[in-house]
Image (cartoon, rainbow, N blue to C red):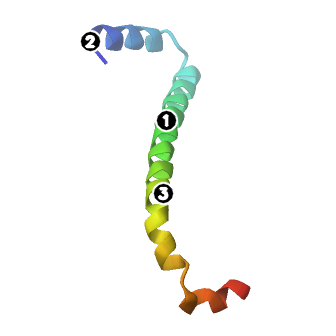
Amino acid sequence: MDAQQIDRFVKKINTLSPAQVRQAELFIDFLSQQEDRRLVEGAMTLSQPSLNAVWDNDEDSVYDDL
């Protein structure tokens, strides 16, 4: 984000009520968490094939029926 974008953003925030500022902050947190969630899901998807070799083995197959 460049300085002009930050300045515009701050000016807009300064026009909001305290309750609206809190809502804006919560929305920004939500957007950040969405990105974090995408990264975690991507890592899980990438690790799944290597973990399948560990999870799917004959020694542990007895636990599949529990």
Residue in the image at 40% along x and 8% along y: 11
- Name which quarter of the figure residue 17 lies in: top right
Mark 3: secondary structure:
helix
For marks 3 and 1, give the CA distance: 22 Å
Q: Is residue 11 above or below residue 44?
A: above
Mark 2: secondary structure:
helix
Is 1 situated left or right of 57 in this image? left
Residue 63, percent across and down? Answer: 65, 88
**Residue under circle 2?**
3
**Residue under circle 1?**
29
Residue in the image at 53% along x and 77% along y: 55
First-in-chain label (2 vs 3): 2
**Residue under circle 3?**
44
- Name which quarter of the figure residue 6 lies in: top left
First-in-chain label (1 vs 2): 2
Q: Is residue 64 above or below residue 51?
A: below
Which class describes the residues within 10 Å of circle 1: few (<14), some (14-19), or many (20+)? few
Residue 57, percent across and down? Answer: 54, 84
